[in-house]
Amino acid sequence: MKNHLEQLRRERGIKQEQLAADLRVSRQTIGSLENGRYNPSILLAFKLARYFNVRIEDIFIYEEDAP
């Protein structure tokens, strides 16, 4: 899943380590999310949206597979 997580984080001057600590996840989780290797749980998606004060849809880009 594509996302704007790295852009949001950098715009606010937040390091991966800080975001991970604030959300109680590993730095590797944040890196994997930013690189699209990992899709967040719904709980983590909500936490990220609340953290950045945006909607989930403003961070994550949902693309359905074409039929």
Image (cartoon, helix red, strand yellow):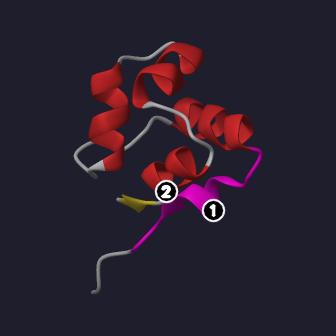
Front: mark 2 or 1 = 2
The local crowd at label 2, few if under 14, some if 14 to 19, many if 20 or more residues have their Cα within 10 Å, is few
Q: Within the magenta stretch, is there residue 40? A: no
- Amino acid marked by disc 2: Gln
Q: Are marks 2 and 1 in contact (CB under 8 Å)?
A: no
Residue 8, above or below 63: above
Disc 2, SS: helix
- Amino acid marked by disc 1: Asp
Please tell me in which quadrant of the rendered image residue 64 appears.
Answer: bottom left
Disc 1, SS: helix
Residue 48's disc number: none
* Quarter in which the C terminus is drawn: bottom left
Residue 5, above or below 24: below
Which residue is at 64% across, 31% downward? 47
Which residue is at 38% across, 33% downward? 30
* Quarter in which the N terminus is drawn: bottom left
Mark 2 highlights which residue? 7
Which residue is at 62% across, 62% downward? 57
The percent coordinates of residue 37 (x first, y second) are 22, 46
Q: Within the magenta stretch, is there residue 60? A: yes
The percent coordinates of residue 53 (x first, y second) are 77, 45
In this picture, residue 10 sits left or right of residue 49:
left
Part of the protein shown in magenta: 53-63
The percent coordinates of residue 44 (x first, y second) are 54, 31
Question: Marks 2/1: CA distance?
Answer: 11 Å
Q: Residue furthest right?
A: 53
- The one nearer the camera, 45 or 35, is 35
Which residue is at 46% across, 35% downward? 41
Mark 1 highlights which residue? 58
